[in-house]
Every structure is written in structure tokens, then in C-alpha cells.
Image: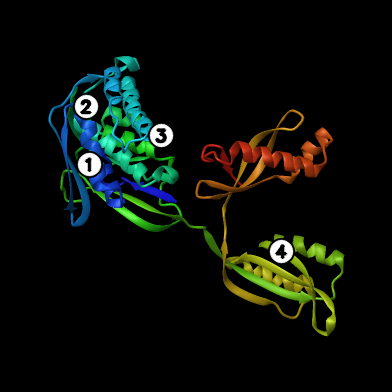
Amino acid sequence: MVTVIDPQLAGVSGNMMVGALIDLGAHPERTAEVMEDAASHFGGADVDVSEVKRAGIRATYVDVRADESLSIGYMEFLKLLERISHPALDDEMLSMARAVFHTIAQAEASVHGVRLDDVHFHEVGAADAVADVMGAVFAYFDLNLHRDDVYTLPVAVGGGLVRGAHGLTPVPAPATTEILRGFPVTGGPSEFELATPTGSALLVNMVRGHRRFFPPMEIQAAGYGAGTMDPEFPNILRIVRGSEAVPHDRVVLLETNVDHLSGEVLGNIFERLMDAGALDVTLTPVIMKKNRPGQLIRVICRENEYEGVLRSIFSETGTLGVRIFPQVHRGVLERRVMEAQVDIKGRRTARFKVGLMGSRVLNARIEYEDARRISLETGIPLRDVIEMAEKQFRDLKLNDSPEDDLAED
């Protein structure tokens, strides 16, 4: 499954994240119960889940009313966090919640130039922020999104100035800027804060990467979480979930039967057709009319190049007719090349052709020239080199995210 968090219009805050996840299908009463229980260790809060409209779009709004606001050191905060033991929360959920708060603490330490142990939480120490994080984490796991490929689109951060514990600061707030480092952001469309530290920390811990646009997918559900303010634009966070769609393109399939060409000519036809723009050429033995043995030449090419390929088929084969199948749809995986170290009589670098569906590696094949080179260097038969290298690659890379290691083919 693929899940896309879309904060490109109205940014992201803690309660918007909770609202969007509930709207996507997370259990509303259980989520609110988890939030209130977590907040009780930090002064208490009341949680109300309702349906609202923002600029005419229906969304789920989570209103968290904290009884008091704490100013607390990070280490003391962690001790209080350890007291949370609601039966609906398992170790994996609590670990993610700690990671979210650790992200915020690291950002604060960087902004203020202090050690992590000396970080002092202000707004994030409030019961409402704790409720937001625990509610969002619970809802995330309740939907099993931790098993999905989750991405974010660019984050709208707003603009102008915001008043916090340290006075006026520019938008995005310094802590938010640190948290979103490495993620695409966009200013506006308002002159107030859209991306909060809590919402941003949740976001970066929930996703495995970012995308400029939606990836290929078949949409199955969408959830909308409302922000507190109701400006002229839809103040909502959208989360879209669906299944991975196999990318496809349109090609032309050309076919002809021949029974008069020698092996040498047929071999030369491969190169000439590829040079003319063919994407693939195959020869298949067939029995033609009058029981004559022949060859079926099948060529795949792009729509805008098929006329040149067609002329080459006529000129190279002497055939009197070619069957044309226009606008054939061809399913294609994204193809890239990855370099990896394999251990075959020592560490050696090899390139692998990798087929990707979204971010998932479906297959990988070592490049022939690299396999041949390793075979010559080691004296190991080529087929054994291929088998060993591809097994090592699968063991090392198949479950890893390819985003940082792949180069376009």
C-alpha cells in the first residue's frame, strides 16, 4: 500500500494529523481515549472529535483543551512519558512517540546551541501537544500505516511572524526549520504559522521520503484533518491511501513472418532495428503455410518512432506486409542502476539493474559486463558469479530504501 500525506496547502499540525488519520478510518473514540489518558500525566486535557467545514470542504476536527501548560526539561519530560501505559498502546507505538519528541528536542538543541540534556520544552511540554503526538501515533498504527510506503508532498509553512516562548520569531519557527531539513517546503499561502514543530516532527517520523507529486497509485481512501482557523483557503491536511499502480506506457507492436532469410541476415536485423528506434526485437520459430519453417519477427517501439522502424523492417527483410498493433499498453517498472559491493574472492564493485514499483525493489540483475569481469578476475564460472552476486545483492539491498543509492540508467 502507498500513503501520501499532503500538507502542501495548509501545512501540518498535531491535531490536523490526528483529524486526518481519524477521517481516514482510525477509531475516533479509542484515539480520543488514548489522547486524554496520555495528557493526564502532563496536567490533563479534554478531547472532542467533530465534523467541520473549512472553506467548504468537510473535514474532521480534533479539539484538544489542555488544563494547564507545562514548562519542563527534556529529561524530566521523558520520565513522565514512561508513565504512559494505556492498554491500547504497544511498545512499537511508544517507541515512535519517543522518536517524535526526540526529533523536537534535537531541533531545539540545535537552535539554542545546547546539549540535548539541557533542552527545555515549552509549548511541546503542554498536555495538548502530548495528546496530539500520542493520538496521531495510535491512529497511525491503528490504520496499519507503519506497513505502507508513506510519503509527504511539499510542506506549506505559512509566513510572517509568530509569538512563542522566546518572543517573536519568523515563520517557519527555527525548530520547525530544523525538523524539516531535507524536506521540500513552500511559503504561504497565509501570513501565519501553518507547519508547527509538533506536526512537522510527526510528519518526518511517519514518512520514508518525500515526493514532488503523487506517485503512481490507485486511490482507495482519503482523510481530511481540519486546522483550528477557518481562513479563505481550505485549512486542511489531506492523507490519501491506495495501492501501488504499475506504471505503463503506450507502444506500437509490429509483426511479420519470413521464411527466406539466412541466420546471418536475421542476426544483422537485430542491430539495424534497434538502431532505428526499436525498444525490443524478438525472433520466434514458427511453421507457416504449406508447412514451411520460418521466423516471426516481433518489434516493440514508441508511437512516435514506429514509422522509421517500419521502413527498416521492409528494407532489411524484404517482407511484403507488416502487421501493426497501435497503442499497445506496456506495463513497465521503473528501472535504475545501483552500484553495490559483493564479496567474491574479495570485495568487488558491481552494477545491478533494479526494477522498482514505487520504492519497493521487485527484481535485480547484475550487469553482464561486470559479471564477466569478475569471472575473469576470479576464475569462477560466469553463471556462478551471477548467482552469488545476485544473492548477496538481495540479502543486502532488497529490503532497503533505494532513494539514496540509485542512479538513473
Q: Earlier in the sequence, mark 1 or mark 2?
A: 1
Three-letter amino acid code at the position of disc 2: His
Which residue is at a point 38% across and 48% down the rendered structure image? 4
The tag on residue 182 is 3
Sort mark 1 into few (<14), some (14-19) or many (20+) by Cα contacts within 10 Å: many
157, above or below 4, in the image: above
- Point 71% across, 64% down: residue: 281
Q: CA distance from mark 1 to mark 2?
A: 15 Å
342 left or right of 62 in image: right
Q: Which residue is mark 4?
A: 281
Q: CA distance from mark 1 to mark 3?
A: 32 Å
Q: Which of 73/80 is in front?
A: 80
Are dots 4 and 1 in contact, CB under 8 Å?
A: no
| Residue 222 in picture, x, y percent from top left | 32, 54
Residue type marked 3: Gly
Q: CA distance from mark 3 to mark 2?
A: 34 Å
- The residue type indicated by label 4 comes to Val
Residue carrying label 1? 32
